[in-house]
Amino acid sequence: MPAMWYAHLKFSHWLPTAVIVLLPGLMAGGAQAQTATVTIRAESATGPVAGVRILASDVIGLTNADGVALLTLGLGQHVIEADRIGFSPSRVELFLAEARDTTVTVLLEVVAIETDGIVVTSGRTERRIEDEPLRIEAVSREEVEEKLLMTPGDIAMLLNETAGLRVQPTAPSLGGASVRIQGLRGRYTQILTDGMPLYGGQAGALGPLQVPPMDLARVEVIKGAASALYGPTALGGVVNLISRRPDPAREFILNHSTLDGTDAVGWLADELNDRWGYTLLAGAHRQDHADVNSDGWADVPTFRRISVRPRFFWDDGRGGAAILTVGGMLEDRSGGTLPGSLTPAGTVHVESLDTRRVDAGFSGRKVFSGLRIMSARASGSLQRHDHFFGDARENDEHRTGFAEVALSGQDGRHLWVVGLAFQADVYEHTDLPTFSFDYIVPAVFAQDELEVADWMTLAASLRYDRHSEFGGYLSPRISILARASEWVARISAGTGFFAPTPFTEEVEAVGLRRLTEPEGWLEERARSAMIDIGRSFGPVELNVSAFASTIDDPLQTVRNGDGTLTIRNASEGSVDTWGTEIFAALRQGPWRLIGSHAFLRSTEPDPQAEGRREVPLTPRHSAGVVGAYEVEGRGRIGVEAYYMGKQELDDDPYRSRSQQHFILGLLIDWRFGPVRVFLNAENILDTRQTRYDPLLRPNRTPDGRWITDVWAPLEGRAFNGGIWISF
């Protein structure tokens, strides 16, 4: 009997390709089988490695919990590729000369994960970003760190300076804002943490202002209708905040600004043993009133905030992993007229908001034999608000719940996911119970990615949600990834729906007390499509995309003559948005240069008159250029310049269109041993809306507003600096 051949290979991206030739055994007469079973064993220094993607010619496999994958291959030459995040990707040539079962043991080397090899999780299949058919944009840890040095207390600047995203002030008296994706209003944007809605189904006007970026590994962004992936709260897109893992570290940041704001943030991470680790984020933040133009109104509101978030991580070394997190935040915030100051009517107007939030979340997965992975996620959050609009008090409580279980697998060239989901959104208004609601939404979903050819992958997603108030809705989405030479193209299209709530941008600015009772609301329905083309030219990366979306039956806020507001669906017409985005990056040695431009048109039925109008506060052109010089391990110097085009304004007594404006910034970050010293100059040109027009209106509007919408910075030129200690 011929002996079994055993090959023990150490895969390394930098080693030359090895060639295994299985020599023929005894030559016997008779017919020979035309296939052979090849057993691939993936091992690392700590044991078997699950979840390794094995590709041999047209056959795809995934190692199971024991680190084993079985491939049936025809006789002849094969190229076997092994790939898993965190290990060196490699390839080996294998020649099968005769039908004989063969075992190959692969020793995988653990490597640091490069930015170009990042694996995104927002598309559900955990592919490398360059292999994902759905366009998912990732903000790397390096970029997160840069914005962390500018605003350690929130992610507003991080998101606002990401192409295609805009943080739009919606409750300017308190500094509240929402995140718009490609021109769509912020209520359509779902903000997640590790795939879980820890900040609620809708983050609200202060959501992005209460998330410290210290514990973020990266940010993933899906633009366009994503209801097929994440349900009705993701009509406009998804911002997924991915947390840092427990690599041993102790860090502390102390920051102070010329606007009299201070941040103290601590980070602690370590491994408890081979399987368990933890991270801990704790922050204390304070900001005093700032009246930059001396009109007696706070251009920057005051707040005091404390937040804490521990996380526990588990990894069995065989593909199974879990995250458990809890978090808490307390904040007291106020704005409006300053002590001793009055409005033009000779009155005092102070707005305040006290927030208390607790949340908890779990995410885990288990790898089974047969290339199957079971995953589960669940989260819950509770927020309480004590809100004053002048003398009018509005207290509320917002509870959200989320659960999901999914089974994924790989069969040949198909990578599929099926699952069940559940969402609960409960809002109780203590003073105005008319606006309370209780939404329950169970759902089923499925997704299939088919590798049609080496140069093309097709992905299709389908989700059915059964809303307790608005019935059932089917949300499909399809995406195509195609490669031609050095070019990469993605095309995607999808639909979605959004369940109405009273939280429009206009209502958030003045409160629910001005709102008439809801009557006959219909769900908003959207369609979106996007095409994206990119390639690299040596050190230069270029990406161009075009997009369009339509929202039918859009909710609109109508201002009535008696000072009340009415939310209703547009009787006819839709919100139509289209545009382009251009992104270019040059990375050469220590130098980095990034440029972006966005063209955006968005029109809607005019809620106050017949016909259509441009959606207010939507710049038609915006652009940004970022240049940086970085010495590895020492520090960096960066310059940023941003342009914002003209915007249509709504009910502004001073102008109907805003002024175009520029913002220039400078960041210096340098390391001295374990200490990093940083200095940031923000808005060096001192661009301010109040340089063009007053912020205060000459008279209070019937619905209670004392200030105009915000279309440019209010705080003007500012400097902040501090230290970042690693120990």
Image (cartoon, rainbow, N blue to C red):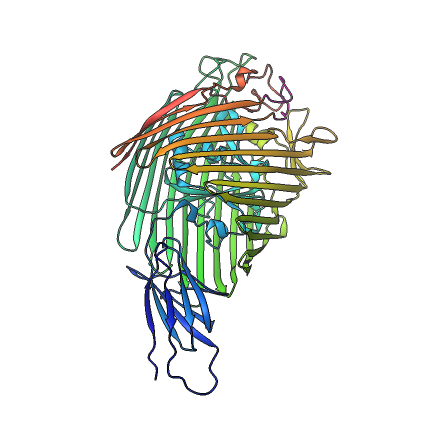
Residue lying farthest to the bottom in this orientation: 29
Instruction: Where is residue 442? Give x, y as percent.
Output: 55, 54
Residue 576 falls in image quadrant:
top right
Instruction: Where is residue 606? Give x, y as percent.
Output: 70, 31
Is 341 one of the magenta-colored residues? no
Name the residue nearer the viewer: 172 or 691. Answer: 691
Q: Residue at x 37, y 24 (%)?
A: 720
Name the residue nearer the viewer: 673 or 577. Answer: 673
Q: Residue at x 38, y 54 (%)?
A: 322
| The C terminus - image quarter | top left
- Tell me if I can see residue 501 in this picture: yes
- Tell me if I can see residue 153 in this picture: no
What span is in magenta? 647-659
- For the image, the number of numbered tags is 0
Query: Up-down: is 362 above or below 517?
Result: below
- Residue 260 appears left or right of 403: left
- Residue 436 appears left or right of 608: left
Name the residue nearer the viewer: 275 or 28. Answer: 28
- Residue 656 appears left or right of 226: right
Is 651 one of the magenta-colored residues? yes
Q: Residue at x 48, y 65 (%)?
A: 57
Instruction: Where is residue 601? Give x, y as percent.
Output: 64, 34
Instruction: Where is residue 187? Give x, y as percent.
Output: 56, 38
Residue 315 falls in image quadrant:
bottom left
Question: Is the stretch drawn in magenta largely helix, strand or loop?
Answer: loop
| The N terminus - image quarter | bottom left
Query: Up-down: is 51 above or below 294?
Result: below
